[in-house]
Image: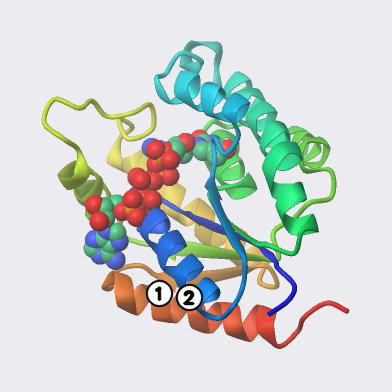
Amino acid sequence: MSRGHFITLEGGEGAGKSTLARALSERLRADGASVVTTREPGGSPKAEAIREAVLAGRIKEYGAFAEALMFSAARIDHIDRLIRPALSQDNWVICDRFIDSTRVYQGVLGDIDAGLLKELEQVTVDGLMPKLTLILDLDPEIGLARAARRRSPGESVDRFESETLTFHRRLREAYLEIARREPQRCVVLDADKSPAALADAAWAALSERLMTTREP
Ligand code: Z5A
């Protein structure tokens, strides 16, 4: 367990990504690994400032491409300040959302040209790709209900939670399409199960993909 890998968790609202990130990091630590858990947008002070602006809806009026630029600016700082340094010190890095969120939310749902977005992605990540992406697949009605139950009284929904159910259904399909196109990197997990059962399934995928085929 000496060498870490970069793992990303993706899926719709309330799919259980943050809960799974905690469970996976506990299992990895119990196995003797050093683990950094992080999230996007965010993960570094400057990226967290961008998160606050985008999720409050302050960029929405400038359009989906402007939002993609903001998520990318946050990602560059996050990669430089946190992800690359952590990986270079042999930590595992578990990140709640990454490039696939931009591909899906801004690309597919924001209708940005795929070629343009790909170029932006390449410049942004500069070669850093997740070794494994776990896509948590869940009926959006269940996910949105979970997210609503978690909200405290008077708390408002964020920029993306306020979108329609049709938006969230298209989002689910877009994630499944990414998984079909990149089966080497992506594993789809049925997220309509208990947190413990989901963690078991994620651990099985991680063990199969990353613990047997470690890079030299
Ligand atoms: N976004 C974007 O547009 N472009 C980008 O490039 C990036 C992001 C990076 C970030 O929101 C938003 O930014 C996101 C996309 C956009 N859209 N929205 N909204 P966020 O970080 O605030 O929220 P999120 O990423 O959507 O996560 P979430 O809503 O917090 O959901 P989650 O992390 O997947 O779920 P959770 O926090 O683990 O669980 C939610 C609730 O369900 C909680 O009460 C749990 O106790 C419960 N839960 C968790 N697992 C289970 C299971 N298995 N069964 C039952 N209940 C469960």
Respond yes or no on whether mark 1 lies under 8 Å from ligand 1. Answer: no
From the viewer's perspective, tell me whether residue 83 is left or right of residue 19: right
Residue lying at 83% horizontally and 77% vertically, measured from the top left? 215
Q: Is residue 29 above or below residue 9?
A: below
Residue lying at 76% horizontally and 32% vertically, measured from the top left? 116
Q: Position of residue 134 (x, y in %)?
A: 53, 65
Q: In front: mark 1 or mark 2?
A: 2
Residue 38 is at least partly visible in this image:
yes
Q: Is residue 172 above or below residue 154?
A: below
Q: Position of residue 3 (x, y in %)?
A: 75, 72
Q: Residue furthest left?
A: 153
Q: Position of residue 172 (x, y in %)?
A: 43, 54
Q: Quadrant of the C terminus?
A: bottom right
Front residue of 74/44: it is 44
| Discs 1, 2 touching: Cβ within 8 Å | yes
| Label drawn at residue 27 | 2
Residue, disc 1? 199
Quadrant assignment, res 150:
top left
Q: Amino acid at mark 2?
A: Arg
Q: Position of residue 61 (x, y in %)?
A: 48, 11
Residue lying at 61% horizontally and 43% vertically, measured from the top left? 103
Disc 2 element: helix
Q: Amino acid at mark 1?
A: Ala
Disc 1 element: helix
Question: Counting other residues with Cα less than 10 Å from the Cα at mark 1, is it few (<14), some (14-19), or many (20 or more)?
Answer: many
Q: How many marks?
A: 2
Distance between the Cα atoms at labels 1 and 2?
A: 9 Å
